[in-house]
Amino acid sequence: MSETKGFDLAAVLSSAVSDLGTAPAGREQIEYIDLDLLDEDSRNFYELSGVDGLASNIALVGLQDPLRVRANGDGRYTIVSGHRRRAAIAKLVAEGMDRFRQVPCIRETDTDSPALQELKLIYANSNTRVMSSADISRQAERVEALLYQLKEEGVEFPGRMRDHVAQACKVSKTKLANLKVIRDQLQEPFQGQFQRGEINESAALYLARIPQDIQADIAEAVGEKCRISGSAAENLLKMAEQYYTFAANTKCPDSSRGVRTCSNVQGFLRKTGKSQYSWQYCEGRCCLDCYNKDSCTGACATAKARVKAEKQDQAQKQAADKERRAKEQEKFRAKNTKAAQRLLRAAEAAGLAEDEKFDLNYGNKYSVKKIRKFAAGDFGDMYFYSEDSLTPDNKSRIVAMAKQMHCSTDYLLGLTENLNPPQPEGQMVFAGWMPGGTTPAAPCDAVADFDLGDGEHYRVCCRWDGDNFVFKSGGSVITQPPIRWMMLPPVEKAEN
């Protein structure tokens, strides 16, 4: 660019007016010209975007900038600058705002060459709008052609023409080069999508660098409605050749259809082209080895068939497991119903209140009322993990419940049906003090401490007859309240 340092293209074009023998412009004046006499310049390639918003603005504050026009010699005028403004005014007139029909215009009086006229058109439009990359590409292509035409007409341009085009279009040389790659190498339908602004410059450039035959395959795979993102296009560029190499050198492991190479290139391309996030891109490996094959839209027919078979197998296993668990629950409920019935029997024998609770196992305390429902088989939506869910889970809880329900630990553990079974000969009986507020579950001999008042108590061997503690000799009722008592094992009768 050193050759063109300080080079002013606008000044060169301005001097070209006299160099090419064109007449100098006179003083410009505003004229009011009927809307119907204003024609668009067929060489204008810019999109007429934002017309509705511009029309609303003109309706509110009026037209602030007059149009620039050139007389055609037949009473009509061609627009040099102001194509969007003319479209907005036409919209207002069509809506009944006839006061805008007479359009303020500046009529150019010079007689420029066609090339200079078109360059003026481009300059006028490029300075008054925000242009898309597609607009800049079209502008650069046309500016380059016009500059070469002016060169043939005698205008001298120092340095490289590419630098002058970049200066005229107010873009970097790198961007200009990228746009040329897109213009020359990007195929349909992607070229049309880029021109319409449906894919961005980054995506268009990556796609343009892909071989044209692979571009065609990508277009067929993703469909014309797909808008490929820049990152997806970059990944397609990196992987395009790899997909084809992989497919050509990889044998399909599905031997049921004979030995053949992978034929799922279209699936690879479709998956990556349609993905919105990088972690969704196809890795270009066998679908049967892909962890994402169960949800991948680009998986091959073999992988889809295997996924379907695996899902069916999984469904059968789940159904079998559900049936097994249902039978298991039925068994557990039956066992726990019997356990609840045993607890209820002991609770009723001990005369426990309905709201009194049992500490069965960690985190589970059930009232007599609840146990009564369980004994009737009413468990609601409870899920059982064993058939012993209503059995105390450690020694301390077993002993505490035996004392609470006035029954033996053997009964709570289901070892006997007797609440207080007799002990076999020679077996030691575990005895413990019971609080005076409780009573034995059945008639038995006992040792008890009775409250005599004033802090004194009296210990005596006595008997519980089922209703009261009585003296063993004579059977008189002991009227003092018991402080604590201990059941004695039965005395075995000696054989004659």
Image (cartoon, grey):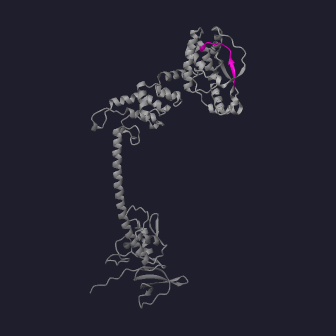
Residue 164 at what x, y percent from top left?
A: 58, 16
Instruction: Determine whether, in the image, residue 57 is placed left or right of residue 316.
Output: right
Q: Does any portion of residue 211 appear in the rendered image?
A: no
Q: Quadrant of residue 286?
A: top left
Instruction: State the residue in front, 397 or 377.
Output: 377
The relative height of residue 426 versus residue 391 in the rendered view (above or below) is below
- Give the residue displayed 67% in from the left and 33% down from the top: 96
Magenta span includes 458: no
Q: Does any portion of residue 13 appear in the rendered image?
A: yes
Residue 232 at what x, y percent from top left?
A: 47, 32
Residue 426 at what x, y percent from top left?
A: 31, 77
The relative height of residue 70 versus residue 456 in the rendered view (above or below) is above
Instruction: State the residue in front, 428 or 192.
Output: 192
Residue 56 at what x, y percent from top left?
A: 66, 34
- Give the residue displayed 37% in from the left and 29% down from the top: 244
The relative height of residue 186 versus residue 378 in the rendered view (above or below) is above
Q: Which residues are magenta?
A: 103-114
- Give the residue displayed 57% in from the left and 10% down from the top: 151
The relative height of residue 127 versus residue 272 in the rendered view (above or below) is above
Q: Quadrant of the N terminus?
A: top right
Q: Quadrant of the C terminus?
A: bottom left
Instruction: Determine whether, in the image, residue 435 is placed left or right of residue 307.
Output: right
Most distant residue in the front direction: 74
Q: Quadrant of residue 50?
A: top right
Magenta span includes 110: yes
Q: How many marks?
A: 0
